[in-house]
Amino acid sequence: MSPEADSSRTPARNERAKEILGTYGRLAWFRHPVERHPIYGYIQVPFIAWRYETPHEELRGTFESAARTAPKNVEWTFTSRKNWMIAPSRLVENSGPDGTMFNEAALAITTNDQEFCAAASEDLEAILQELTESQKHTGP
Protein backbone atom coordinates (compact mmCIF):
# COMPACT_ATOMS: atom_id res chain seq x y z
CA MET A 1 0.00 0.00 0.00
CA SER A 2 1.38 3.42 -0.89
CA PRO A 3 1.81 6.04 1.87
CA GLU A 4 -0.80 8.19 0.14
CA ALA A 5 -3.36 5.39 0.35
CA ASP A 6 -2.74 4.78 4.06
CA SER A 7 -5.02 7.27 5.82
CA SER A 8 -3.68 6.21 9.23
CA ARG A 9 -0.19 7.56 8.52
CA THR A 10 1.13 10.45 10.56
CA PRO A 11 0.90 13.71 8.60
CA ALA A 12 4.17 15.15 7.38
CA ARG A 13 5.72 17.74 9.66
CA ASN A 14 5.01 20.57 7.23
CA GLU A 15 1.30 19.65 7.30
CA ARG A 16 1.29 19.46 11.10
CA ALA A 17 3.18 22.75 11.46
CA LYS A 18 0.75 24.52 9.16
CA GLU A 19 -2.20 23.10 11.08
CA ILE A 20 -0.73 24.09 14.46
CA LEU A 21 0.06 27.64 13.34
CA GLY A 22 -3.42 27.84 11.82
CA THR A 23 -4.96 27.30 15.25
CA TYR A 24 -3.54 30.69 16.24
CA GLY A 25 -4.99 32.56 13.25
CA ARG A 26 -5.72 32.38 9.54
CA LEU A 27 -2.50 31.90 7.56
CA ALA A 28 -1.86 34.05 4.51
CA TRP A 29 1.50 32.44 3.73
CA PHE A 30 3.50 29.46 5.04
CA ARG A 31 6.89 27.87 4.32
CA HIS A 32 8.54 24.76 5.72
CA PRO A 33 11.02 22.57 3.87
CA VAL A 34 10.28 18.89 3.37
CA GLU A 35 12.00 16.91 6.09
CA ARG A 36 14.21 14.98 3.69
CA HIS A 37 15.48 15.99 0.29
CA PRO A 38 13.21 14.22 -2.24
CA ILE A 39 16.09 13.04 -4.44
CA TYR A 40 19.14 12.68 -2.19
CA GLY A 41 17.34 11.73 1.04
CA TYR A 42 19.37 13.88 3.41
CA ILE A 43 17.71 15.71 6.32
CA GLN A 44 17.13 19.36 5.50
CA VAL A 45 17.72 22.10 8.04
CA PRO A 46 14.25 22.76 9.49
CA PHE A 47 12.45 26.06 10.01
CA ILE A 48 8.93 27.39 9.84
CA ALA A 49 8.00 30.74 8.36
CA TRP A 50 4.52 32.22 8.08
CA ARG A 51 2.34 35.30 7.90
CA TYR A 52 -1.16 35.71 9.25
CA GLU A 53 -3.88 37.46 7.26
CA THR A 54 -4.39 39.72 10.27
CA PRO A 55 -1.34 40.47 12.45
CA HIS A 56 -1.49 38.90 15.91
CA GLU A 57 1.12 40.90 17.83
CA GLU A 58 -0.16 39.49 21.12
CA LEU A 59 1.15 36.07 20.05
CA ARG A 60 4.81 37.11 19.79
CA GLY A 61 5.50 36.01 23.35
CA THR A 62 4.07 32.56 22.72
CA PHE A 63 6.31 31.99 19.70
CA GLU A 64 9.37 33.54 21.36
CA SER A 65 8.88 31.31 24.39
CA ALA A 66 8.47 28.14 22.31
CA ALA A 67 11.64 28.94 20.33
CA ARG A 68 13.57 29.67 23.51
CA THR A 69 12.41 26.94 25.90
CA ALA A 70 11.38 23.86 23.88
CA PRO A 71 14.62 23.07 21.98
CA LYS A 72 17.20 20.90 23.74
CA ASN A 73 19.88 20.46 21.05
CA VAL A 74 20.58 23.75 19.26
CA GLU A 75 19.71 27.41 19.81
CA TRP A 76 16.60 28.71 18.05
CA THR A 77 15.34 32.19 17.18
CA PHE A 78 11.92 33.70 16.59
CA THR A 79 12.01 36.63 14.17
CA SER A 80 9.23 38.87 13.02
CA ARG A 81 9.32 41.26 10.15
CA LYS A 82 6.88 40.97 7.25
CA ASN A 83 6.87 37.21 7.90
CA TRP A 84 7.36 35.43 11.20
CA MET A 85 9.88 32.65 11.50
CA ILE A 86 11.18 30.12 13.99
CA ALA A 87 14.56 28.83 12.86
CA PRO A 88 17.85 27.61 14.25
CA SER A 89 19.88 30.67 15.27
CA ARG A 90 22.78 29.42 13.17
CA LEU A 91 20.61 29.57 10.05
CA VAL A 92 19.45 33.09 10.87
CA GLU A 93 23.01 34.28 11.59
CA ASN A 94 24.42 32.70 8.41
CA SER A 95 21.69 34.36 6.34
CA GLY A 96 23.31 37.77 6.68
CA PRO A 97 22.07 40.92 8.40
CA ASP A 98 19.17 41.39 5.99
CA GLY A 99 18.44 37.68 5.43
CA THR A 100 19.20 37.80 1.71
CA MET A 101 21.47 34.74 1.93
CA PHE A 102 18.82 32.56 3.63
CA ASN A 103 18.47 29.94 0.88
CA GLU A 104 22.24 29.70 0.46
CA ALA A 105 22.74 29.34 4.22
CA ALA A 106 20.07 26.63 4.44
CA LEU A 107 21.69 24.71 1.58
CA ALA A 108 25.17 25.00 3.09
CA ILE A 109 24.04 23.74 6.50
CA THR A 110 21.96 20.95 4.96
CA THR A 111 24.72 19.62 2.73
CA ASN A 112 27.58 20.05 5.20
CA ASP A 113 26.18 19.27 8.66
CA GLN A 114 23.68 16.43 8.84
CA GLU A 115 24.24 16.03 12.59
CA PHE A 116 23.08 19.60 13.12
CA CYS A 117 20.08 19.06 10.85
CA ALA A 118 19.05 15.93 12.77
CA ALA A 119 19.39 17.70 16.11
CA ALA A 120 17.45 20.73 14.85
CA SER A 121 14.77 18.46 13.39
CA GLU A 122 14.27 16.88 16.81
CA ASP A 123 14.04 20.35 18.34
CA LEU A 124 11.42 21.51 15.86
CA GLU A 125 9.23 18.62 16.93
CA ALA A 126 9.54 19.84 20.53
CA ILE A 127 8.70 23.40 19.45
CA LEU A 128 5.59 22.22 17.62
CA GLN A 129 4.55 20.22 20.67
CA GLU A 130 5.03 23.31 22.87
CA LEU A 131 2.89 25.39 20.50
CA THR A 132 0.19 22.70 20.57
CA GLU A 133 0.21 22.68 24.37
CA SER A 134 0.19 26.50 24.55
CA GLN A 135 -2.84 26.64 22.25
CA LYS A 136 -4.71 24.18 24.47
CA HIS A 137 -4.18 26.52 27.44
CA THR A 138 -4.94 29.81 25.70
CA GLY A 139 -7.64 28.82 23.20
CA PRO A 140 -8.30 30.48 19.85
Image: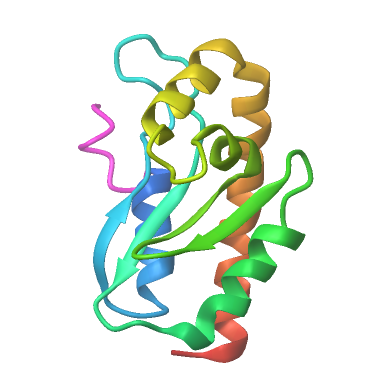
When the figure is inspected, residue 50 is found, relative to residue 94, above or below; the finding is below
Q: Quadrant of the N terminus?
A: top left
**1 or 133, which lies in front?**
133
Q: Main secondary structure of the magenta part?
A: loop
Q: Which quadrant of the figure has residue 123?
A: top right
Q: 63 above or below 127?
A: below
**Residue shown at the point (43%, 43%) measured from the top left:** 99
x and y percentages locating residue 32 in the rendered image: 37, 45
Name the image colouring.
rainbow
Q: Residue at x 42, y 79 (%)?
A: 24
- Residue 64 versus residue 37: which sits nearer the camera? 64
Q: Which residues are magenta?
A: 1-11
Q: Residue furthest front?
A: 97
Q: Residue at x 49, y 35 (%)?
A: 95
Residue 10: tell me if it is visible. Answer: no
Instruction: Indicate yes or no whether the magenta region holds residue 4.
Output: yes
**In the image, is 124 to the left or to the right of 95?**
right
Between residue 89 and residue 125, name the one nearer to us.
89
Image quarter (top left, top right, bottom left or bottom right) of the C terminus: bottom left
Residue 84, position in %: x, y?
43, 63
Q: Quadrant of residue 127?
A: bottom right
Q: Is residue 102 magenta?
A: no
Q: Residue at x 22, y 36 (%)?
A: 4
